[in-house]
């Protein structure tokens, strides 16, 4: 079985130093309290970022999403984006990383004084953890991911808005279990109206007759890579549509791919047993090429802005 986050084995990850509330500690000693609101309730937000040539690609977009989410749930991080960048840089440097690294930055409401739900019981400030791993996507991902449509859906915004990149991922975990039971690698999730939405871990695109389709974005996390792919298509003159469409269109697609910070664009090989293309098709390959160029420009711009 393959997942969208499969990475090549790297022995250096056995001795990672992890940022935990201002300290760098060995991964075996990196711990949070059982009273932490993230552990107890999933009360927190996270960001995944990738390191290229010493810079965190699309850093500003990731920080905009993180701080928007934190503001929406009244969680004060106690630092600004540049301080976040500094702690990520320090963590990467401590682990000897310049590129081929992936970060999971986690912010929770902090340690509670009692094991109950109310946010006022978190009184010691936020818990901030950054795990930065040596991470290169596994070669097996190039062969494509097998998806299964599942009964678990992405809900309405007034239930739990999928735009929150929150620690509360049980909805997606259940979807992943359902896909596994169906013999697939990951889940293709529908929206509350039965239209194709996203997978349990990534945003989802199809290609039909040279057009690129993705969901409206109303019921999915609006990923940074998703946004970049839509912009790439528009700049390149590739017709791209954010629209409602059903499994009928997905099953008969010429190509399909997933987007995410880790894998960038991962081809889909099958949906519910229907073969989709043969690995990365021509439109997917063109988007990949243009995405690599976009990453390089963004990294160069960050270096210039920071005088590096």
Image (tube, rainbow, N blue to C red):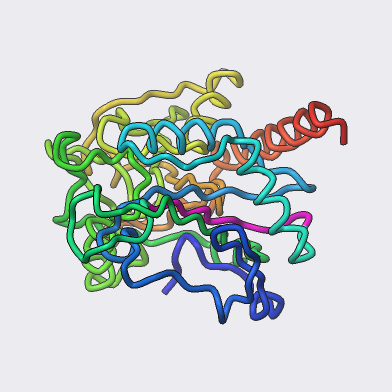
Q: Considering the image in quadrants, where does the C terminus appear? A: top right
Whole-percent x, y for residue 14 in the image: 64, 80
8 or 141: nearer the eye? 8
Q: Residue at x 43, y 30 (%)?
A: 212
| Quarter of the figure with residue 22 | bottom right
Q: Residue at x 62, y 37 (%)?
A: 59
Queried whether the magenta region covers residue 273, the answer comes back as no
156 or 186: nearer the eye? 156
Whole-percent x, y for residue 166 in the image: 34, 49
Q: Considering the image in quadrants, where does the N terminus appear? A: bottom left
Q: Main secondary structure of the magenta part?
A: strand
Queried whether the magenta region covers residue 103, the answer comes back as yes
Whole-percent x, y for residue 113 in the image: 27, 62
Left or right of 262 in this view: 222? left
| Quarter of the figure with residue 19 | bottom right
Left or right of 97 in this view: 109? left
| Quarter of the figure with residue 185 | bottom left
Q: How many marks?
A: 0
Whole-percent x, y for residue 244 in the image: 24, 29
Left or right of 12 in this view: 253? left
263 or 214: nearer the eye? 263
Q: Residue at x 65, y 63 (%)?
A: 136
Point out the stretch of residues depicted in magenta: 98-108
Q: Residue at x 33, y 51 (%)?
A: 199
């Amino acid at each position: 079985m393959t997942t969208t986050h499969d990475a090549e084995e790297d022995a250096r990850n056995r001795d990672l130093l992890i940022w935990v509330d201002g300290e760098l500690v060995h991964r075996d000693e990196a711990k949070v309290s059982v009273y932490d609101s993230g552990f107890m309730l999933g009360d927190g937000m996270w960001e995944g970022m990738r390191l290229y040539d010493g810079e965190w690609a699309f850093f500003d977009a990731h920080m905009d999403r993180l701080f928007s989410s934190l503001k929406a749930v009244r969680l004060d991080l106690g630092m600004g984006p540049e301080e976040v960048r500094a702690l990520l840089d320090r963590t990467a440097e401590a682990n000897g990383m310049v590129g081929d690294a992936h970060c999971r930055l986690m912010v929770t409401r902090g340690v509670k004084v009692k094991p109950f739900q109310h946010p006022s019981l978190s009184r010691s400030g936020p818990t901030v953890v950054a795990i930065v791993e040596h991470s290169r996507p596994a070669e097996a991902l190039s062969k494509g991911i097998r998806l299964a449509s599942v009964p678990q859906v992405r809900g309405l915004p007034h239930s739990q808005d999928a735009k929150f990149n929150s620690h509360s991922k049980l909805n997606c975990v259940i979807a992943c279990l359902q896909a596994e039971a169906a013999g697939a690698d990951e889940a293709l999730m529908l929206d509350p109206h039965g239209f194709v939405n996203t997978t349990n871990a990534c945003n989802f695109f199809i290609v039909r007759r040279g057009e690129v389709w993705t969901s409206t974005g109303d019921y999915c996390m609006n990923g940074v890579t998703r946004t970049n792919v839509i912009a790439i298509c528009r700049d390149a003159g590739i017709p791209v549509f954010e629209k409602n469409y059903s499994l009928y269109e997905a099953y008969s697609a010429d190509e399909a791919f997933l987007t995410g910070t880790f894998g960038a664009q991962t081809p889909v090989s099958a949906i519910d047993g229907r073969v989709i293309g043969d690995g990365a098709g021509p439109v997917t390959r063109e988007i990949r090429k243009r995405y690599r160029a976009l990453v390089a420009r963004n990294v160069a711009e960050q270096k210039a802005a920071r005088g590096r």
